[in-house]
Image: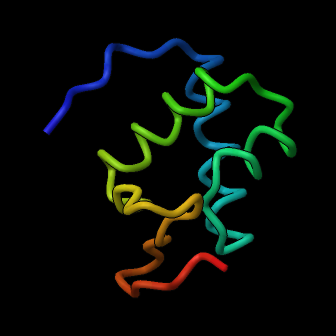
Amino acid sequence: MTHSPPSTESEDALYQAAKALVLNQRKASVALVQRHLRLGYKTTCRLFERMQAEGVVVPLEGEDRRWVLSEGALQRAD
């Protein structure tokens, strides 16, 4: 398991926005989060690493979309 470095208040706000977007859309792709939140690739990847560490999404498995975990149910990100 990887540990995230301490985050700032603005990073926490971005994380919460990205997490809400992924859960509401039931989609988890870097491009989706980049477009909706107008973020760069590196920032978005850090958010995905944190979502993965916290069990919001599962690791990428050869596709450009990830499985989204919501309320204990595994749902396919279309």
Q: How far across and how far down the image is residue 66, in percent?
A: 50, 65
Residue found at the very far front of the displayed protein: 62
21 left or right, relative to 36: left
Coloring basis for residues: rainbow
Q: How far across and how far down the image is residue 4, in percent?
A: 30, 24
Residue 53 lies, with reference to residue 25, above or below; the image says: above
Residue at position x 40%, y 38% in the image:
50
Residue 13 lies, with reference to residue 75, above or below; the image says: above
Q: How far across and how far down the image is residue 8, in percent?
A: 52, 12
Name the quadrant containing residue 18.
top right
Residue at position x 49%, y 71% in the image:
68
Residue at position x 57%, y 63% in the image:
65
Residue at position x 58%, y 58% in the image:
64
Name the quadrant containing residue 43.
top right
22 left or right, relative to 73: right
Residue 13 lies, with reference to residue 17, above or below; the image says: above
